[in-house]
Amino acid sequence: MIEQGESWRRIAARVEAMTRAAETFLLAQRVLSEDPYGIGLKVFGAQGKLLHKEINQFLDQYRGALPPAAEEALDHFFSSSGLAGLLTDGGISGLDSVKLVVPVLAGITSQVSYLLADREAIGSRLVDRAFGHLQRSIAAVPSEAAVWQQAFTKGEIECEKLGGLHLLRFGIFASKADSAGARTDLILGDPLLTTDPLLAASEALILTEWKKANDKGRSEGRTGDVSASCVLSRPSSGDRAA
């Protein structure tokens, strides 16, 4: 949802600005260890209190629409951080306000920003880009077209290997399901292990099914055509992805 993303980015921007200001304040504290003007409480304490309230309103407004992990992180933040009590008038003052309030707010902001990142949407865009690039490469580069034509004549498995290699260039790890439902590596043909370092280094994992065009398609003027359907996914924990 665009609205919730924009709302959170506004909060995150305020926390980031507050963090930069706090860094400047703490540098000054190396020279003057006291806070005679009460900047810690008046500025950082007050801003922290407002941000705490704004984050709470964000959670109330979008509860149920947030990714479960993000909602859980925010619930844990309000139940365990104790920030609300710290931000009451007279709760803390001076340097303590900066040392306690700013890191806690920065921590939850960073965590939720990561969890709100729409990784599935990012993966989908990568897949679209990869297949678009493949189509244009075959059309524009004769050697690329020849390689795919040769793979086409050999069968779907050769096409899967080529397709898996192409997708990997875009940070996409492609697999397929065998007859038992377990996932196998498109290129190597081995069972897909979640401990594979290449899997962890990939931006997205997709489950693919590659099919050669049928005779009807070729009789209509299509030559050397291969299609692939794919589903964005992530393997479950364990030694073998199923």
Image: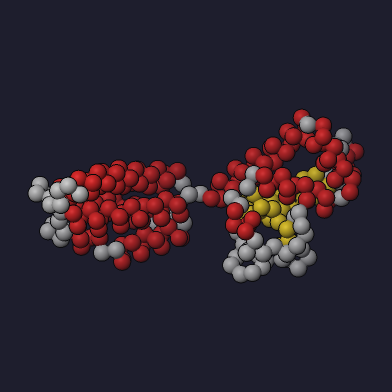
Residue at the far front: name it. Answer: 31
Q: Position of residue 81 (x, y in %)?
A: 29, 63
Residue 64 showing in the rendered view: no
Measured from the top left, where is residue 11 in percent x and y? 33, 46
Name the residue: 69% across, 53% down: 174
Q: Horizontal placement of 236 versus 3: left or right? A: right
Task: Specify whether residue 77 is in view.
Answer: yes
Residue at x-position 56% and y-position 50% = 120
x 33%, y 45%: residue: 16
Identify the image's colour scheme: rainbow, by chain, secondary structure or one colour: secondary structure
Above or below: residue 222 compared with residue 4 = above
Along the viewing direction, whichever of 156 and 231 lies nearer the viewer: 156
In the image, residue 147 lies at what x, y percent? 83, 40
Please count the marks in the image. Answer: 0
Query: For the view shown, which residue lies furthest in the left direction?
Result: 36
Percent from the top left, x then y, of residue 125? 60, 42
Residue 184: quadrant of the picture? bottom right
Q: Nearer the viewer, residue 238 or 58?
A: 238
Q: Report the residue at 73% width, 48% height from top.
A: 165
Q: Establish if 142 lies above or below 198.
A: above
The quarter of the picture where residue 103 lies is bottom left
Does 226 sit left or right of 63 as displayed?
Answer: right
Q: Please, which residue is most extreme toward the top here?
A: 140
| Left/right of residue 210 with respect to residue 49 in the rendered view | right
- Quarter holding the C terminus? bottom right
Quarter of the image for residue 18 reads: top left
**Above or below 220: residue 15:** below
Give left or right: position of 141 versus 22: right
